[in-house]
Image (spheres, rainbow, N blue to C red):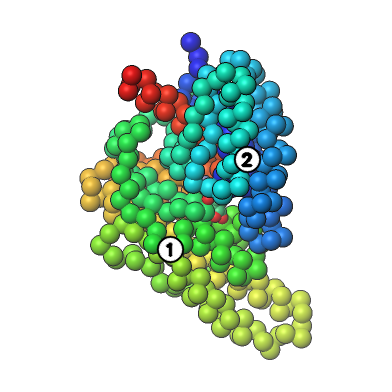
């Protein structure tokens, strides 16, 4: 018999609800992004986020059920993203999801948000395209709050091989974009700008690329970008009274700086992931989290994996950023674990 789990996600600035069938077939995945709301503050304001989650949760959940064609009665469990996340946002989601589970007499599951990201790569909308990733595999988990390399050895088993010592990769994108006055969230903006810019304009340092561990450090990069941006714009001071020309020249330079910054981050992420897989003799690589949507990361990781004969799996775009489908899917793993432990 088919099984369904309703997932709910409110860890940051996406209110999301989804219905997943049999481990990883996504029937619906509604994501209401608050990015526009937080844009004017240059980042997520937790209290504003939690109020918006409170307002959106009933509608988003109903929409997810409607789109899936499944009623709440048919659902086996309600899964909520537990942590990590913004405390006020988490508590709104927890209260709503636990209340729903209790009133409908459903199993209530608290899912780790990061483990759910790792599961994201398994998700599909097409029941005919069920992916089987052989264990063990290496997962590069890159989000707004975390950067880790994990060795995943079984459904609910993993080991963290390395992590960031300061800023997460997504955070570095967001902070750099804010500094260059490009807007929020920085990752997708820098990704898009970089597609038509010169990534070789500046060779920024590749922090910790040769360190003999799998850790990262991105906080120094934004200072380097700031320094270079000041120098770069000085070049055009002579045009300052020709507003339109100055604007165009400086915008192009900002794009080149962004692309150069992105290249440095991507090089470190790719190099460390490939090193980890090579040293451990693991031939399967996945990427997960918001930054796994990055075009350049996908391209360069693809190229390097190909050279090494590793297979690379990355999530469909809708499962990279925060979404409830990954929460529901990880809920299935938790149910399996509970059953196995008797
Ligand atoms: O996983 P996620 O949705 O939320 C967290 O759990 O943090 O990741 C959000 C992060 C943000 O920092 C955002 O700037 C980054 O992912 N991001 C990207 C791209 N799309 C989102 N970074 C680089 N390139 C992208 N295309
Ligand atoms: Zn996330």
Q: Residue at x 60, y 38 (%)?
A: 93
- Residue 276: % across, % down: 28, 51
- Residue 137: % across, % down: 32, 40
Circle 2 is placed at which residue position? Answer: 92
Q: Quadrant of residue 60?
A: top right
Contact between labelled residues 1 and 2, with CB atoms less than 8 Å apart:
no
Circle 1 is placed at which residue position? Answer: 166
* Residue sitting at the far top: 1
Mark 1 residue crowding within 10 angstroms, few (<14) / some (14–19) / many (20+): some
131 horizontally vs 189: left or right? left
For residue 338, say whether it is visible. yes
Q: CA distance from mark 2 to mark 1?
A: 28 Å
Ligand 1 within 8 Å of the CB at mark 1: no
- Residue 94: % across, % down: 58, 36
Q: Quadrant of residue 51?
A: top right
Q: Quadrant of residue 270?
A: bottom left
Q: Residue at x 67, y 41 (%)?
A: 53
Residue 51 versus residue 175 in the image, above or below: above
């Amino acid at each position: 018999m088919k099984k369904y789990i309703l997932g709910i996600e409110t860890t940051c600035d996406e209110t999301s609800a989804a219905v997943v069938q049999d481990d990883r077939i996504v029937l619906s995945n509604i994501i209401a992004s608050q990015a526009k709301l937080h844009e004017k503050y240059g980042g997520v304001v937790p209290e504003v986020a939690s109020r918006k989650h409170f307002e959106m949760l009933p509608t988003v959940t109903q929409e997810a059920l409607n789109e899936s064609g499944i009623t709440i009665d048919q659902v086996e469990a309600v899964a909520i993203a537990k942590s990590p996340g913004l405390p006020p946002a988490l508590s709104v989601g927890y209260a709503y999801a636990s209340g729903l589970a209790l009133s409908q007499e459903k199993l209530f599951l608290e899912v780790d948000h990061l483990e759910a990201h790792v599961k994201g790569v398994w998700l599909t909308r097409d029941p005919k395209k069920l992916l089987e990733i052989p264990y063990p595999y290496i997962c590069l988990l890159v989000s707004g709050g975390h950067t880790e390399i994990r060795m995943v050895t079984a459904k609910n088993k993993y080991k963290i091989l390395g992590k960031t010592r300061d800023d997460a990769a997504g955070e570095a994108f967001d902070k750099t974009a804010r500094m260059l006055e490009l807007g929020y969230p920085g990752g997708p903006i820098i990704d898009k700008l970089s597609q038509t810019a010169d990534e070789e304009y500046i060779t920024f340092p590749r922090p910790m690329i040769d360190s003999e561990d799998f850790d990262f450090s991105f906080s120094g990069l934004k200072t380097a970008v700031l320094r270079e941006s000041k120098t770069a714009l000085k070049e055009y001071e002579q045009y300052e009274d020709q507003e339109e020309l100055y604007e165009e020249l400086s915008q192009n330079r900002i794009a080149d700086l962004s692309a150069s910054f992105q290249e440095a981050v991507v090089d470190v992420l790719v190099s460390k992931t490939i090193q980890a897989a090579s040293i451990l003799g693991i031939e399967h690589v996945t990427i997960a989290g918001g930054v796994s949507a990055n075009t350049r990361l996908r391209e360069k990781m693809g190229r390097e994996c190909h050279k090494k004969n590793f297979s690379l799996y990355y999530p469909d775009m809708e499962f990279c950023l925060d979404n409830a489908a990954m929460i529901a899917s990880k809920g299935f793993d938790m149910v399996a674990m509970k059953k196995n432990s008797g």
